[in-house]
Every structure is written in structure tokens, then in C-alpha cells.
Image (cartoon, grey):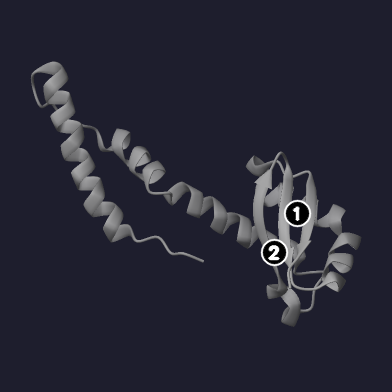
């Protein structure tokens, strides 16, 4: 899983502030102040920080949702992928895991809805790899 390089974002963020000031100067004739609260969300969106934070939340919620149904040694054998139209795609390494998690799909969905309600996951689609 890729990590977030905050130092890179900070450096590029500073250049983004400078670009914003130059743009403000061209449009208004004076430099003016640029609010950090207006720039930070744009920087986060530009460099995928929000996406990575959402991904981390999904991975954490998935781990907590399947923990009661898989032995500790098998919990890393499944990995959540994308959410498309309310369907969570989950990659698993063995068909037996699909069957086991399929038996508990309703409970897993309830836990995911509680942990990350903004994702609106209504269904799970398992993809067997390997």
C-alpha cells in the first residue's frame, strides 16, 4: 500500500500558494492574502491524500468487519478494492474464503455500514485471485 509523502505535498503546496498569489495578482491587481483553508483541500485533492485516507479507512473497516469470522492467521487473505455503485469488490486468495465470508455477508455489511456509512456499501463482490 503506498504511503503519503507529506513533505512532498508540503513543498508542492508552497508552490501552489505562490501560484495562487500570482493568479490573484493578475486578476485583482494586488497580491492579497490566500487563506490556507482554501488551499489545503485543493492540495489534498490534487495529490490524492483524501483518496488514500478513504482507502485506509476502508481497509481498517474491512479488517474489523471480517475479524469475527476468520481465524487470525487468515485475516490478511482478503483485501477490499473499489466501491462501485454500492458494491465493494474484495480480492481473496482462495475460493473457500469466498464461501466463508459469503455466509456472513449480512453481518459484514452491517459492520461496514456502521464503520464507514459514507461509502454506502450494499453488496460485496468477491474476486478470487491466483
Q: Which residue lies at the image location 41% right of the left edge and 42% below the top edge?
A: 45
Q: Which residue is mark 2?
A: 64
Q: Earlier in the sequence, mark 2 or mark 1?
A: 2
For the C terminus, the image quarter is bottom right
Q: Badges 2 and 1: C-beta atoms under 8 Å apart?
A: yes
Q: SS class of the residue under badge 2? A: helix
Q: CA distance from mark 2 to mark 1?
A: 8 Å
- Residue farthest front in this picture: 130
Q: Which residue is mark 1?
A: 111
- Residue farthest left in this picture: 30
Q: Which residue lies at the image location 35% right of the left edge and 38% below the top edge?
A: 42
- Residue farthest bottom in this picture: 73
Classed neighbour count for the residue bearing mark 2: other residues with Cα under 10 Å, few (<14), some (14–19), many (≥20): some
Relative to residue 110, is residue 46 drawn left or right? left
> From what the image shows, is residue 22 above or below residue 53?
above
Instruction: Determine the image quadrant of residue 64.
Output: bottom right
Task: Residue 92 in the image: state x and y as whole percent.
Answer: 74, 68
Relative to residue 47, is residue 88 drawn left or right? right
Amino acid at each position: 500500500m503506498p504511503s503519503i509523502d507529506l513533505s512532498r505535498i508540503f513543498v508542492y503546496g508552497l508552490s501552489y500558494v505562490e501560484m495562487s498569489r500570482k493568479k490573484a495578482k493578475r486578476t485583482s491587481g494586488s497580491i492579497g492574502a490566500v487563506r490556507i483553508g482554501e488551499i489545503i483541500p485543493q492540495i489534498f485533492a490534487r495529490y490524492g491524500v483524501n483518496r488514500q485516507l478513504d482507502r485506509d479507512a476502508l481497509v481498517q473497516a474491512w479488517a474489523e468487519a471480517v475479524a469475527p469470522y476468520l481465524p487470525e492467521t487468515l485475516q490478511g487473505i482478503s483485501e477490499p478494492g473499489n466501491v462501485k455503485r454500492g458494491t465493494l469488490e474484495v480480492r481473496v486468495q482462495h475460493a473457500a474464503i469466498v464461501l466463508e465470508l459469503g455466509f456472513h455477508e449480512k453481518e459484514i455489511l452491517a459492520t461496514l455500514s456502521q464503520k464507514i456509512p459514507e461509502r454506502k456499501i450494499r453488496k460485496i463482490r468477491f474476486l478470487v485471485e491466483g
